């Protein structure tokens, strides 16, 4: 997934397009080496921009800027109210620019416009949520067994390295930057090398909002080199990562040099459980949306559909009847419900899994190939694909495919549904469809996952915690929980007894 959009280092882009500079220390700059990367629309192959190709030395510059801004800049002296107001201003700017953000996201990443518009609105909301929260950070006063006033101060962790994936570039940047700024931290954000354009646009707005130099730095470069430097550099106090579990493990290994704090939001192989008593039409829609929203390139995608055997064949038939409505095309084309995959390399990976599913003996109920026609010739499209009669031991039931590939697995009893749902190394998301709320809640309590739904799939809110059990990560983002990762906790004890200690 790393090289398909890359122009050779130190060569200028073929299109001659202007380089969109990255933000380091309050200035928009290029990579020291002069290296650039040209990006191409994954649906049409057209050039969509040229960005600096940061290397370790650029990331080091950004870390030094963030360190300086944290240790000696004005940022730590700003009040929570000022930080909150800045975040609200950024929220306003993102909302005012939402149309441009959404279109840019579509061109760079491939998702349908309606989904990109939702992301832009949600990113604005995220800045507003943490803008409001900045003034609610507080410690406690404790009753201690001495004549002492003992209380807790909450303080920013320091310099935060933030690494985000390509599937929700703007939204992930907001999820990372907003709570860090609310807490008073400084930031070096590294978007995916595949989709840095909306993060760079956001950097311009953050700069325009008046965030002091060095507080937010955005570097565009590859995981190998730029990302590794951020994870390993001892001047970074905390690393916040969203991406694949394998990379998460590499980061956890690279980061402990200075015992920096680590939060990880990783992958999933999420069960979507449909009981026979569910509202049938709602469950059909929910199963398709769970699997094919954002082309299935979603960590929380409902990629394992567990269906009670009594309605299994009927549900699959109903999904197949609706599949033609999952209209493929360029994300900016009206009515399109599914765009291309992000890159040729990622499509090859997804297609590899489709071959594996066929070899393993699952029934290819629909899709599996590339759509035909001139409109699709230049893009990385894959049809929405459903495998039926999947058994829990198959690789397509166990491994994260991160594309539009759904595995349908029938079950007979509630206990079996729970056992199958939890039979995974992941624990990110899960859903239950039933008209019996007692059963729904009973099953939810048994599921080992951090994000769960009853009779819906995918909605999530800035107010609510996001993160996984097991190998889906550690820590939580968003909501009141999300800010905790950016705060230190200091105890303060004030002696109220004026007599000397008398120990010696
Ligand atoms: P990757 O793990 O490949 O990459 C994520 C980020 O890490 C990118 O910015 C990447 O840079 C960078 N990176 C890669 N290698 C290293 C390294 N050795 N050191 C430091 N940084 C590195 O994930 P993808 O971008 O492919 O995203 C898909 C994955 O993200 C899926 O597994 C998905 O489940 C997960 N995800 C999880 C979410 C959650 O909230 N739990 C949300 C969204 C996605 P570059 O791309 O430039 O190489």
Image (spheres, rainbow, N blue to C red):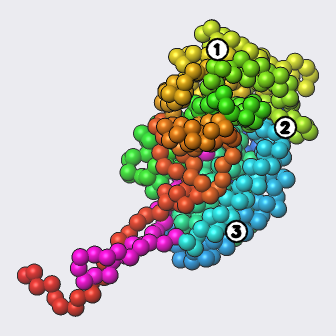
Of residues 75 and 267, the one nearer the viewer is 267
Q: Residue under circle 3?
A: 88
Determine crowd level at label 3: few under 14, some 14-19, many 20+ residues with C-alpha closer than 10 A. many
Mark yes or no: residue 290 visible.
yes
Q: Is residue 434 left or right of residue 136?
A: right
Q: Quadrant of residue 395?
A: top right
Q: Quadrant of residue 495?
A: bottom left
Q: Is residue 392 above or below residue 131?
A: above
Q: Is residue 112 above or below residue 464?
A: above
Q: Which mark, by number, is residue 389?
A: 1
Determine crowd level at label 1: few under 14, some 14-19, many 20+ residues with C-alpha closer than 10 A. some
Instruction: Check residue 157 for magenta coloring.
Output: yes
Secondary structure category for the residue under label 1: loop
Assign the C terminus to one quadrant of the image: bottom left
- Is the Cβ of the residue at disc 2 closer than 8 Å to that at disc 1? no
For the record, the magenta segment spans: 137-164
Query: What residue is drawn where x is 71% and y is 13%?
Result: 364
Q: Nearer the viewer, mark 1 or mark 3?
A: 1
Question: Seen from this angle, which residue lies furthest left?
Answer: 504
Query: What residue is drawn where x is 38% and y is 51%?
Result: 259
Q: Residue under circle 2?
A: 331
Instruction: Check residue 241 for magenta coloring.
Output: no
Q: Is residue 375 left or right of residue 398?
A: right
Real-space Cα separation, disc 1 to disc 3, in angstroms: 50 Å
Mark yes or no: residue 45 visible.
no
């Amino acid at each position: 997934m790393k090289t398909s959009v890359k122009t050779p280092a130190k060569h200028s882009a073929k299109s001659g397009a202007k380089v969109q500079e990255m933000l380091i220390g309050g200035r928009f700059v290029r990579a020291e080496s002069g290296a650039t990367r040209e990006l191409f629309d994954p649906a049409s192959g057209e050039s969509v921009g040229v960005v600096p190709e940061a290397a370790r030395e650029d990331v080091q510059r950004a870390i030094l800027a963030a360190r300086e801004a944290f240790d000696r800049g004005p940022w730590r002296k700003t009040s929570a109210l000022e930080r909150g107001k800045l975040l609200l201003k950024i929220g306003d700017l993102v909302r005012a620019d939402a149309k441009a953000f959404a279109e840019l996201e579509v061109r760079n990443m491939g998702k349908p416009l309606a989904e990109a518009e939702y992301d832009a609105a949600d990113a604005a909301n995220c800045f507003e949520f943490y803008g409001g929260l900045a003034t609610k950070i507080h410690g406690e006063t404790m009753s201690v067994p001495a004549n002492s006033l003992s209380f807790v101060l909450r303080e920013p962790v320091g310099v935060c390295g933030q690494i985000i994936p390509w599937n929700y570039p703007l939204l992930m940047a907001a999820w990372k930057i907003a709570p860090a700024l609310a807490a008073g931290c400084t930031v070096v954000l590294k978007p995916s090398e595949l989709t840095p354009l909306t993060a760079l646009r956001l950097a311009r707005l953050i700069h325009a909002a008046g965030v002091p130099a060095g507080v937010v730095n955005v570097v565009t470069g590859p995981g190998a080199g730029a990302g590794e430097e951020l994870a390993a550099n001892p001047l970074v106090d905390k690393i916040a990562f969203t991406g694949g579990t394998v990379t998460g493990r590499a980061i956890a290994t690279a980061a402990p040099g200075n015992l920096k704090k680590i939060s990880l939001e990783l992958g999933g192989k999420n069960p979507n459980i449909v009981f026979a008593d569910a509202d049938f039409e709602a469950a059909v829609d929910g199963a398709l949306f769970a699997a094919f929203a954002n082309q299935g390139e979603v960590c929380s995608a409902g990629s394992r559909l567990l269906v009670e055997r009594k309605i299994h064949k009927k549900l699959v038939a109903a999904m197949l009847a609706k599949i033609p409505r999952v209209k493929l095309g360029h994300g900016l084309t009206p009515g399109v419900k599914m765009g291309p995959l992000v890159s040729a390399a990622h499509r090859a990976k997804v297609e590899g899994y489709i071959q594996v599913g066929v070899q393993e003996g699952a029934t290819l109920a629909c899709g599996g190939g590339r759509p035909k026609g001139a409109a699709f010739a230049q893009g990385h499209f894959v049809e929405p694909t459903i495998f039926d009669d999947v058994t829990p031991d198959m690789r397509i039931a166990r491994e994260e495919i991160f594309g539009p590939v759904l595995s349908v697995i029938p079950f007979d009893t509630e206990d079996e549904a729970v056992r199958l749902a939890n039979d995974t190394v992941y624990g990110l998301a899960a859903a239950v469809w039933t008209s019996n709320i007692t059963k729904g809640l009973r099953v939810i309590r048994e599921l080992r996952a951090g994000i769960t739904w009853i009779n819906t799939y995918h909605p999530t809110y800035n107010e609510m915690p996001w993160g996984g059990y097991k190998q889906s990560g550690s820590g939580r983002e968003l909501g009141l929980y999300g800010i905790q990762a950016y705060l230190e906790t200091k105890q303060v004890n004030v002696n109220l007894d004026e007599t000397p200690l008398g120990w010696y």
